[in-house]
Amino acid sequence: MEQPLTHLDDHGAARMVDTSSKEETLREARASGRVRMAPQTLALIRNQALTKGNVLETARLAGIMAAKKTGELIPLCHPLPITSASVDFAVAGDDLLTIEAVVRVVGRTGVEMEALTAVAVAALTIYDMCKSVDRGMVIESIRLEAKSGGRSGTFRREHAAGPPSE
């Protein structure tokens, strides 16, 4: 079943989707990702031993701020009055840190891009704060886990009970 691309008009020109006829509903999106690093780097993060400061709290703030700015970062993405944004971290091994963002809005369009942007910027912040000790870090598996609200209904990735594991 092929669906037309909504960001293109009949002539193939880029356009912002008109959401004015959509009903405002509560919408939520959850995204995840992970940063793989040397075990020593993860130990430094856990022990708050990096000279740049608390890596996870800085990354949490960066992710939340990025979610709020998504409409300015991604062309044709609607600026949204986000009602809630959270970014959380979990250690998933001696070399793996997972990131999960949940974003909510009462609006006419979803917050999938905001949740994905929050994860991506949190991961980039971790990389930036730790690159002096580990340039080999890998940001991986940034993905939408679940979304609810709106005309398209609910989406849940199989095995979406939490951040992706190995």
Image (spheres, rainbow, N blue to C red):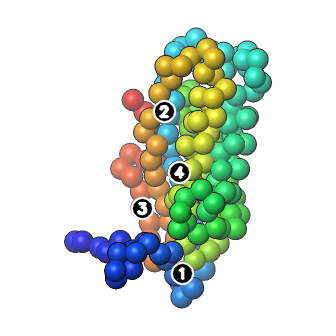
Pointer 2 or 4: first along the chain: 4
Answer left or right for 144 relative to 118. left
Dot label at residue 139: 2
* Residue type, numbered disc 3: Phe
* Mark 1 crowdedness (10 Å alpha carbons): few <14, some 14-19, many ≥20: few
In this rendering, the answer to whether 122 lies above or below 157 is: above
Query: 59 or 99: which is nearer to us?
Result: 59
Q: Residue at label 1?
A: 19
- Tell me what residue is drawn at x 56 percent, y 44 percent: 119
State the image coordinates of residue 151 (x, y, percent, origin top left).
46, 77
State the image coordinates of residue 104 (x, y, percent, origin top left).
63, 62
Q: Residue at label 3?
A: 155
Q: Secondary structure at mark 3?
A: strand
Q: Residue at label 4?
A: 116
Position of the C terminus by quadrant: top left
Work out which residue is located at the far left of the displayed protein and give it: 1
* Residue type, numbered disc 4: Leu
